[in-house]
């Protein structure tokens, strides 16, 4: 089988991180993408829904997906099996790992998280650690079809998306309000955790996602930034980022679980 080797110049910090556990492997894999250009809509290049893998251009979600797939497909600290990586991307991105049209892609992060928890490769840390609850009326895609060309040309896909939105809107989720997040993070938020930012944008559940990274004792965000147009580590603590953004309301903390090989 083919192997993928990562020999790009890694800092001593990255090499040290490799020796630690699964969540920290997630961070080290994320750090491999530093400087990668931010490009939106890289998954919408085909007329028919199909698996697209483009590690040279990412948005905030695909960046996390690729780092997660690398972590789950890892054979050792710096080698992954290519076939396993491809299979994991599909399992992460699509409901039950099956490609069945545009609506089978997990467009909403709440749906993406729910699928990962159900499939057994993610755990919702906020569910166990935070008593704060959030319920959002989710309908952004169906109320903004002009932003999604697939929905404009397919009434069937639109109806499926509406049904998904209705199902997601009926659920309450645990989250951490942004005023409860200290500058130095919390003991139960680890390096390599997936941080999904909740929002007050009407119709939307989560507006951004990245990876937790403690820098000099401060919880920062490793993410694909649309404003900076690349993958980077935030210059300021995540708590300050959240306070300065009126649309960000809090976060969900999701952790990768050790998993065996996926079927492909």
Image (tube, rainbow, N blue to C red):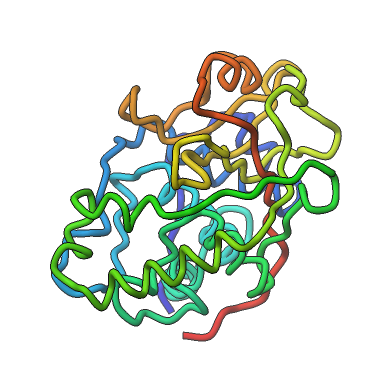
Task: Say which residue appears at 50% left-offset and 70% top-offset.
Answer: 88
Task: Say which residue appears at 34% left-offset and 51% top-offset.
Answer: 55
Q: Quadrant of residue 129?
A: top right
Residue situated furthest bottom in the rendering: 263
Up the image or down, 79 lies above or below 36; here it is below
Q: Residue 41: x, y in percent?
A: 25, 50
The residue closer to the viewer here, 103 or 96, is 103
Instruction: Evaluate whether residue 180 shows in this view.
Output: yes
- Number of disc labels: 0
Query: What is the quadrant of the N terminus in the image?
Result: bottom left
Instruction: Evaluate whether residue 18 shows in this view.
Output: no
Task: Say which residue appears at 35% left-offset and 71% top-offset.
Answer: 103
Residue 111 appears left or right of 150: right
Residue 20 appears left or right of 57: right
Residue 19 appears left or right of 74: right
Q: Residue 125: x, y in percent?
A: 77, 50
Task: Say which residue appears at 61% left-offset and 41% top-offset.
Answer: 195
Q: Quadrant of residue 237?
A: top right
Q: Quadrant of residue 104?
A: bottom left
Q: Residue 191: x, y in percent?
A: 70, 38
Up the image or down, 230 lies above or below 30; here it is above
Up the image or down, 134 lies above or below 13; here it is below
Q: Residue 135: x, y in percent?
A: 64, 50
The residue closer to the viewer here, 192 or 115, is 115
């Amino acid at each position: 089988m083919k192997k993928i080797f990562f020999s790009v110049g890694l800092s001593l910090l990255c090499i040290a991180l490799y020796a630690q556990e699964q969540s920290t492997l997630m961070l080290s894999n994320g750090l491999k993408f530093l400087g990668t250009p931010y490009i939106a809509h890289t998954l919408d290049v085909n007329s028919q829904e199909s698996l697209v893998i483009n590690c040279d251009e990412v948005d905030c979600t695909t960046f996390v997906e690729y780092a997660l797939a690398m972590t789950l497909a890892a054979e050792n600290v710096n080698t992954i099996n290519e076939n396993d990586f491809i299979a994991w991307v599909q399992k992460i991105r699509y409901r039950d790992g099956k490609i069945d049209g545009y609506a089978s892609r997990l467009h909403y992060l709440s749906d993406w998280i729910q699928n990962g928890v159900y499939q057994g490769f993610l755990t919702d840390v906020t569910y166990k650690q935070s008593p704060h609850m959030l319920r959002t009326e989710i309908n952004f895609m169906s109320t903004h079809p002009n932003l999604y060309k697939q929905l404009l040309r397919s009434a069937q896909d639109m109806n499926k998306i509406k049904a998904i939105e209705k199902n997601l809107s009926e659920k309450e989720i645990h989250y951490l309000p942004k005023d409860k997040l200290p500058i130095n993070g919390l003991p139960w938020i680890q390096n390599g955790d997936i941080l999904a930012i909740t929002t007050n944008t009407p119709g939307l559940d989560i507006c951004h996602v990245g990876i937790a990274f403690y820098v000099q004792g401060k919880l920062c965000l490793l993410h694909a930034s649309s404003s900076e147009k690349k993958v980077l580590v935030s210059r300021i603590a995540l708590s300050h980022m959240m306070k300065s953004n009126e649309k960000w309301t809090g976060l969900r903390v999701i952790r990768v679980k050790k998993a065996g090989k996926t079927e492909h």
